[in-house]
Amino acid sequence: MKQQLESIKGEAEQALANLSSMQELENIRIKYLGKKGALTSVLRGMGSLSKEERPIIGQMANEIRCYLEDKLEAAKSMLHQKQKEEKLKQEVIDVTMPGKRKSLGKKHPLSLVLNELEDIFIGMGFEIAEGPELELDYYNFEALNIPENHPARDDQDTFYINENIVLRTATSPVQIRVMEKSKPPIRIISPGRVYRSDAVDATHSPVFHQLEGLVVDKNVTMGDLKGTLEIFAKRLFGSQSKVRFRPHYFPFTEPSAEMDVSCFACGGSGCRICKGEGWIEILGSGLVHPKVLQYGGIDPEVYSGFAFGMGLERMVMMKYGIKDIRLFYENDIRFLRQF
């Protein structure tokens, strides 16, 4: 039995000398010191020894067990250190190597102009209001004086989720929601994405962006509207810009007007951009219809207001001379880098 113990010790030492991984270390521990290991098997046979031999063999077995446990712990530490050194070699950083240049993105042209528009109106005391893109038919049409079967709905045909829920055709519903929750004076702009079932071409898209404005207070007049929008045009297109208003019809304003700005390319003398007219149409506007004020919970006998709305894509196309609206949505980095 002494020879068996010496043999077990020698085999274990040889196995530990050729160790290369933590898994091999665990296999050696189980093989020699586990419940069914070689050393345990020898100890189980001690019952056949004489009383004189048992303490001698027992002491020898315990010494070998302690010896092998120390060897296993030393081998474990060695493996940990070796793994740490290998990891450090793999993760070494050469501080002399040139860095990799990171490509930085730029703001989309729609975002650039929207930020500029917001700054202009915030500077005039307006606040930004937002609302849901998935809108009730009531807010999108009825509360804006566009009842069912009204011909104006043909011009704003949209995507219906069901007969009572639509993808909003304008940001005008935000104005109704603000009037319901706020008391005059009200001075807000409502930028956002809108939807209409238009065929895609160079100037139309089923998804686009608008910015609308609303002012409600006592004694608000058409003169207030004209003055506000003239300041806006001069700040956006330059102090030399001129504006003119042409009568128009909108169901939610009365009186209503389209606003033109003098062509920023030719100064009003006529060119291909303004099609020789010297003027470019940029937005619709008017005094808020009394019925719309009533839908918003505001007494039209006490308060009046004006509203206006413009297409963001149209403003960006005019500002930068872009001819195709589809360029805004194609995510061509060559196009976006220009801004």
Image (cartoon, helix red, strand yellow):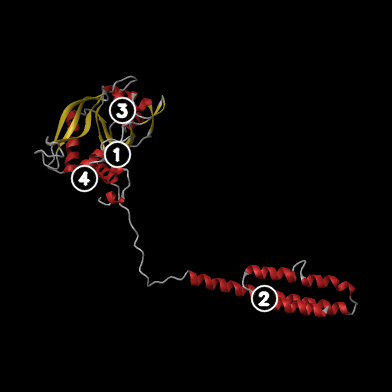
How far is the residue under mark 1 from the one under mark 3? Answer: 26 Å
Is tag 3's residue or tag 2's residue first in the polypeptide sequence? 2
Q: Is residue 289 left or right of residue 88?
A: left
Give the residue type that dot 3 points to.
Gln
Q: Is residue 130 visible?
A: yes
The residues tagged by marks 3 and 2 sit, at their Cα atoms, a distance apart of 83 Å
Q: Is residue 153 above or below residue 88?
A: above
Seen at 19% across and 36% down, the residue is: 229
Counting from the top left corner in percent of width and height, residue 223 is at 17, 30
The quarter of the rendered structure image containing the N terminus is bottom right
Above or below, 139 relative to 205: above
According to the picture, the residue beneath numbered tag 3 turns out to be: 156
Mark 2, residue position: 16
Q: Which residue is mark 1?
A: 127
**Mark sitting on residue 146:** none
| First in residue order: circle 3 vs circle 4 | 3
- Amino acid carrying label 4: it is Tyr
Separation of disc 1 and disc 2 at Cα?
77 Å
